[in-house]
Image (tube, rainbow, N blue to C red):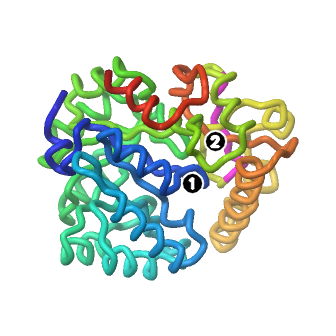
Amino acid sequence: MTKELTKLLNIKHPVIQAPMFLVSNAKMVIEAMNGGIAGCIPALNYRTLDELRTAIKELKTAKVEGGSFGFNLIVNKSNVKYRGQLEVLCEEGCDFIITSLGSPEETIKQAHKVGIKVFCDVVDLKFAKKVEHLGADAIIAVNNQAGGHRGGASPEALIRELVANCDIPIISAGGVGCKADIDKMISYGAAGVSVGSPFIASTEANVTDEYKQACVDYGADDIVVTERISGTPCTVINTPYVQKIGTKATWIENLLNKNKKLKKWVKMIRFSIGMKATEKAAKKATYKTVWVAGPSIEHTNEVLPTKAIIDRLVN
């Protein structure tokens, strides 16, 4: 296995436990660190800055040699908590920040002042070159096998293109459910991998038993792309409820999206409604089962402790 990511984060295995909205928590990341990998949590999983600050202190206390922790920041204007979250992360300290959905320029500038590394989500070469120019420490290459909001290119095509044209490490995100998948991504030139969906069915995940069991019962062929959650294509498990409501935007949404003045507001409303539906499905029993996951749940055969899932991935 490559040592590039392991050196960058001082971890034992070149694996990042990907930040998952509603799913990731401090308990999962502590177990990830104990298993010799890095763990990451969306800052938006904490409703207040005080809760975020408390989580950072808990993770710092629990950190062990060979493990690493970080947070994911949504860096566009839609995240009104962004600046406060960045300030707290820089004040308290963490090993790395992963940026998504916007320009990482300010994050890179502030984080580097206090020694925090910054990795940036990208889906193509154009944005990879932009974040490299801004000073990113590594690139998270989000491919078309990723869970949630995915990219458009295959893992091999995306990794090979970025490796050939960028001078910073490329971390592959999407399509990893077992060690063979990790080996494959590294053979394409990746410095390591970011793995999310397999950890949904962990005992430490902060979601319902029904959501975890769905990741066991369903497989890669049951993953569909829907426009009904955030307005942006997103992968979900094809439950009877998803089949009932359909995966395409309604004709009204399509019509409003063509109006330049209304487009922004339509997306914000669609995102808000979709996120509330996703949260209800993840946190409580409901017939409205919109469960976000990627094709890598194919290798999930039972609900296991995080450390057991890491063992499956690296051994």
**Side (left or right) of 53 relative to 97:** right
Q: Is residue 153 magenta?
A: no
Q: Is residue 255 above or below residue 227?
A: below
* Camera-side residue of 134 and 44: 44
Q: What amino acid does circle 2 point to?
A: Val
**Side (left or right) of 210 relative to 219:** right
Tell me the quarter of the picture where residue 119 sits: bottom left
For the C terminus, the image quarter is top left
Residue at the image position 18 percent from the left and 45 percent from the top: 169
Tell me the quarter of the picture where residue 134 sits: bottom left
Q: Is residue 266 above or below residue 8?
A: below
Which residue is the site of mark 1? 21
Q: Magenta span covers which residues? A: 222-229
Q: How many marks?
A: 2
Residue at the image position 42 percent from the left and 45 percent from the top: 31
Q: What amino acid does circle 1 point to?
A: Phe
Q: Which mark is residue 70?
A: none
**Side (left or right) of 6 relative to 98:** left
Nearer-N-terminus badge (1/2): 1
Q: Which mark is residue 292?
A: 2
Q: Are marks 1 and 2 in contact (CB under 8 Å)?
A: yes
Query: Whole-Å distance between the Cαs marked 1 and 2?
Result: 9 Å
Residue at the image position 27 percent from the left and 34 percent from the top: 159
Q: Secondary structure at mark 2?
A: loop
Measured as percent of width and height from the top left, residue 285 is found at: 83, 45
